[in-house]
Image (cartoon, rainbow, N blue to C red):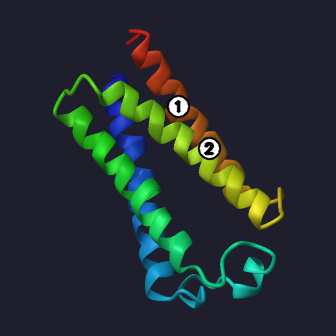
Amino acid sequence: MIARLAIGLEIFLSLGALFGGAALILGPDGHLLGIPSTVLHGSLFNSFLIPGILLFVVIGLGPAVAALLTLRRSVLAPLATFGVGVALVGWITAEMLILAGLGSLAWAFYLVLGASIAAIGLSWLRGRD
């Protein structure tokens, strides 16, 4: 049961991040997602290219690999699931700090999603199915 839940959440996260990351890579000015580049003022980035690559690889491919590990019944699957959750919480926290805002429902949703995935991984690591 816990493995199926992990796979479902990881695939959901992966698909969204792959789409978002690809859109930022293909349109580094943010126009494909309707994000004004002005939100990057004061950050380390002049465009969304590097954040898009990071989003695609870490938050997009990472959960896909974790889901694949779970499907293959790898002993690393619980740890990978925990890592995905922690990575997502870290990503969203950095995004909130860099883009200077705490008021987004999307950020709140992804913080809860990341915490949930991490909790599933931790519970799984502890052997509680």
Let me know if residue 37 appears in the view: yes
Q: Considering the image in quadrants, where does the C terminus appear? A: top left
Q: Which of the two discs, 2 and 1, labels the residue nearer the N terminus?
A: 2
| Residue at (75, 72) in percent of width and height | 43
Residue 128, x across and y down, in percent: 42, 9
Left or right for 63, reference 21 = left
> In the rendered view, would you say 89 is above or below 13?
above
Q: Which residue is under mark 2? A: 89
Q: Which mark is residue 118?
A: 1
Left or right for 50, reference 72 = right
CB atoms at circles 2 and 1 under 8 Å apart? Answer: yes
Label 2 environment density (alpha carbons within 10 Å; few <14, some 14–19, many ≥20): many
Q: Quadrant of residue 113?
A: top right
The amino acid sitting under disc 1 is Ala
> In the rendered view, would you say 10 is above or below 26?
above
> In the rendered view, would you say 67 is above or below 34?
above
SS category of the residue bearing label 2: helix
